[in-house]
Amino acid sequence: MRVEVAVVGAGIIGTLAAYELRKRGLSVLLLDAGKEGAATLASAGMLAPYPEGLSGEVLEAALFGLEYYPGLLEELAAKGWKVEAGFSGTQVVALSQVEKEAWAAFPSGKQPAAQESLSYPVRGGRGARTFPGGYVHPKALREALLKALEVMETPFLQAEVEEVKEGGVRGRWREEPFTAQARFVLLAVGAWGSRFGLGVRPLKGEALVLEGPAPPAPLFAGEGYLLPREGGVYVGATQREGWAQGVDLFGLRWLSDYAHERFPLLAGARFREALWGYRPVGELFVGEVERGVLAAVGHGRNGILLAPWTAKRILELLGV
C-alpha cells in the first residue's frame, strides 16, 4: 500500500488530522492498535481555555479550537452525523473567598462576566464566573469523523505499528506482517509515544457518568468538574500516574464522594458508566522528529481543545 500520509493513532488528534488532509485531496492511511485506555474514548471533551489556565501560544491555539468546532460540527451534521456539543461557556465556582478574590487578577478586558447566582447548586459555592468555552462529545466526534473518512475512501486498519521511518511504516495487521509506503508519517499515538522515542508519559484519568440532572454548561468546582453527557452528567476526574488499568476502588470513591458531597442534585443519582483513559503528559510538540516523520504529542488533558490547531499545524508543515 502506498499513500501520501500514514497517520498512526486514531484518537481525536489523528482522526481530525486525517480528515483535514483528505479534504485537501491527499491520500491517507489511518492506523490504530486499538489499545485499552485511549484518552479520546474516556475524555470529557471540555473546551475551557481560561479555566484550564492556558496562556501564551497555547492559549491562542486553544481559542482557535474553540472557534473551529461549531463549523466542523455543522459540516458533519449536514452529512448526517450529529455530535453532542454546547458552546454557551464554562462556569467556574468559587469555593472560598480567596478563590473569589482571585478573579480580580485577570488582565484588563479579559475578566469573565460575574454571575449573581450559581446556575447549578453547589455546596459551599460563593459565586461563579462564566468564561468563553463549552464541550463536545469526544467519542461521538471520533465516530463521526471515522464515518466521514470512510465515505472519503480512507483506509482504516486496526494494526500495531512496530517501526516508523522515512518512507513508511512496518507492523502487524490481523496477526500478519504488513508494510505501508508513505511520503510522510504522522505519529498521533497519545500516551504510547514513548514507544517511538517521544517524551510523554501516561497520567490516568477516571470519570463517572451518572443518571442525573446535568448543569447547563461545563462547571468547575474545586478539584473536579461536571458537564452534560447523553442526557446525564459526566463527573471527572482523577489524575493518577502510571499504566494501571481500569477504574479501581480509590477512583470510584473519590468520584462518588465528590459528586455526592459537592452537588445536592446528584445525591441520589444512579450510576450509568465508569470511564478511564491515559492522558499523554509531556511538553506539547507538533513538528518533525526526523525526515518525513512528524509527531503530535503532549496534549495532556486538552487533546480535544487543541486538536484543531494541531491539524492546522500539520497542514502547514506538509505545505497544504
Image: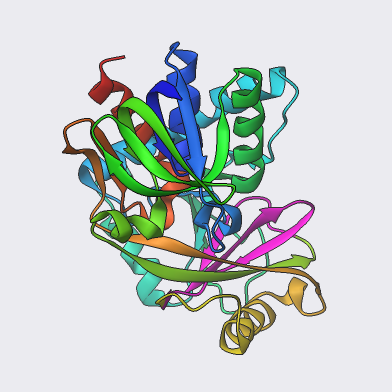
Q: From the viewer's perspective, is 227 left or right of 184? A: right
Quick check: 279 above or below 57?
below
**Dividing the picture into quarters, in which one does residue 169 lie?**
top left
Camera-side residue of 282 and 52? 282
Residue 243 shows in the view? yes
**Dividing the picture into quarters, in which one does residue 143 lie?**
top right
Q: Residue at x 63, y 47 (%)?
A: 139
Q: Residue at x 49, y 15 (%)?
A: 23
Q: Position of residue 305 (x, y in %)?
A: 44, 43
Q: Which residues are magenta?
A: 214-240
Residue placed furthest toward the front: 176
Residue placed furthest toward the left: 290
Q: Position of residue 302 (x, y in %)?
A: 41, 51
Q: Residue at x 62, y 38 (%)?
A: 141
Residue 108 shows in the view? no
**Dividing the picture into quarters, in which one does residue 225 lie?**
bottom right
Question: In the image, is residue 230 part of the stretch drawn in magenta?
Answer: yes
Q: Which of the image's four quarters has the C terminus?
A: top left
Q: Position of residue 237 (x, y in %)?
A: 53, 70
Protein image colouring: rainbow
Question: In the image, is residue 14 part of the stretch drawn in magenta?
Answer: no
Q: Residue at x 60, y 69 (%)?
A: 207
